[in-house]
Image (cartoon, grey):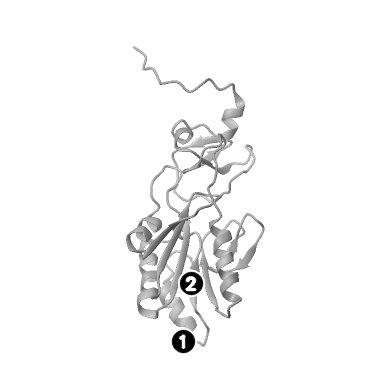
Amino acid sequence: MPELVFFSGTMDCGKSTLALQIAHNRSARGLQALIFTRDDRAGEGKLSSRLGLVTDAVEAVRGMDLYAYVVDRVSQGGRVDYLIVDEAQFLAPDQIDQLARVVDDLDLDVYAFGITTDFRTRLFPGSQRLIELADRIETLQVEAMCWCGARATHNARTVGGEMVVEGEQVVVGDVNRPAETEVGYEVLCRRHHRRRMTGASARAGVLSPDVLPVASA
């Protein structure tokens, strides 16, 4: 039976690499993917991984009816065996509904890849809708690591090297950008996300041992 599958994880855990690997493996078996993406780091209409792999994709712009696009592609003689949707967290909830309809009405598998929560630890609307509708949710097994060596579970946004917790939910950037870059991202464990302590700020001063916080009188 066709499925809507949501592959989720933090930044830098290999989501786009897995998407490209699925496309490669299935194309070797003669299957044709229709690939959607939104706001990829490589530019419009591209699906890329940090390993340097890149392929063409359809930019799923705001207001686009993904179900109608698939139907139109097939009606014009195009072949579509399954869908890959990268950066799915940026899609609107109604676009996720359209992907579910592709599965149910067109009998096509849909593999969606995305970040679950934003830099404020809040669910992206697209990810929330995927959690509500997906037949299966897969957490990627390649674990990103915080600068301290612990498992990274949270996405942090930095501006000028300093972590911020306010601002627009979607601002395109990338991990491991130098501190002088205006907007960057870093993956952190919960402890250091709560303390707003990035790798740059940790290196900027001498860290004292972790102690229980003491409230002033």
What residue appears at the point 58 percent right and 78 percent down from the top-left corner?
Answer: 29
Residue 45 appears in view? no
Whole-percent x, y for residue 124 in the image:
40, 52
What residue appears at the point 46 percent right and 30 percent down from the top-left corner?
Answer: 195
Q: Is residue 17 above or below residue 161?
A: below
Which part of the image, by quadrant, shows the C terminus? top left
Nearest the camera: 72 or 168? 72
Q: Is 32 positioned to the left or the right of 133 in the image?
A: right
Residue 182 appears in view? yes
What residue appears at the point 41 percent right and 77 percent down from the top-left corner?
Answer: 68
Whole-percent x, y for residue 110 in the image:
44, 70
Q: Is residue 29 above or below residue 158?
A: below
Q: Amino acid at mark 2?
A: Leu
Q: How many marks?
A: 2
Secondary structure at numbered mark 1: helix
Q: Which mark is residue 75?
A: 1
Mark 1 neighbour density, 10 Å: few (under 14) some (14–19) many (20 or more): few
Q: Residue furthest top?
A: 217
Q: Which mark is residue 83?
A: 2
Secondary structure at numbered mark 2: strand
Q: Residue 132 appears in which quarter of the rendering?
A: bottom left
Whole-percent x, y for residue 57 in the image:
57, 69
Nearest the camera: 142 or 115? 142
Q: Residue 99 appears in which quarter of the rendering?
A: bottom left
Q: Is residue 29 above or below residue 217?
A: below
Whole-percent x, y for residue 65 in the image:
41, 72
Q: Amino acid at mark 1?
A: Ser
> Of the residues tagged 1 and 2, which is closer to the observer?
2
What residue appears at the point 56 percent right and 74 percent down from the top-left corner?
Answer: 26
Disc nearer the start of the sequence (1/2): 1
